[in-house]
Image (cartoon, grey):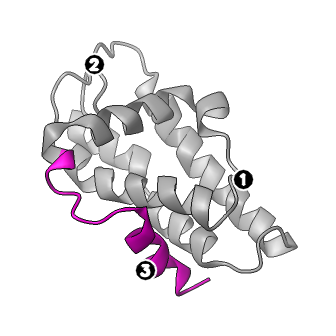
Amino acid sequence: GATEAAAAALNGFFPAMAKFIKHSPNGDEEDVELRTALEGKLQTLEDHLSGDGRSGPYLVGNGELFTLLDCSLAPKLYALDVCLEKIKENPIDLKGKLPLLRKYMDDLFARPSFQSTVEYGPETVVWGWGSYH
């Protein structure tokens, strides 16, 4: 069904993100391979968000309903957003290459429910993820 299709679009995203963010040094051959793998997962998500029959911004079905899948993905995308800038030196142009994903992220991050649960700022994300780098 619709939930399974949305979940399939996320398959492998978090492991690919974690491997890329944790890898050091930035820009070596392995880093490029890991970035390419992550970009593939992000492109799958972009493709899902651009699917036929979609009228809303969220993941499941036509995108009109905010679901637990969106809730689950929001903190992961927040960590990705912060780490791409602060740890990985902006190697992926989300706005240029993945505009629907960038808009989805911005919409998620602007939701009052997300804002009310973000008890930590980018510095805490960098502290947590940067300890691996």
* Side of 26 where 18 appears, left or right: left
Marks 2 and 1, Cα distance to the nearest angstrom? 29 Å
Image: magenta residue range:
114-133
The percent position of residue 4, horizontal first and vertical second, equals 27, 44
Nearest the viewer among 22 and 50 is 22
Q: Residues within 10 Å of mark 2 (few under 14, many from 20)?
A: some
Q: Residue at x 46, y 22 (%)?
A: 50
| Three-letter residue code for mark 2 | Gly
Residue that mark 2 sits on: 56
The image quarter containing residue 61 is: top left
Question: Are circles 2 and 1 on residues that touch, CB within 8 Å?
Answer: no
| Three-letter residue code for mark 3 | Gly
Camera-near label (2 vs 1) is 1
| First reached walking from the N terminus: tag 3 or tag 1 | 1
The percent position of residue 114, horizontal first and vertical second, equals 20, 47
Q: Is residue 82 placed above or below 19 in the rendered structure?
A: above
Dot 2: what SS? loop
Q: Quadrant of the C terminus?
A: bottom right
| First reached walking from the N terminus: tag 2 or tag 1 | 2
Camera-near label (2 vs 3) is 3
Q: Which label number is shown at residue 91?
A: 1
Residue that mark 3 sits on: 128
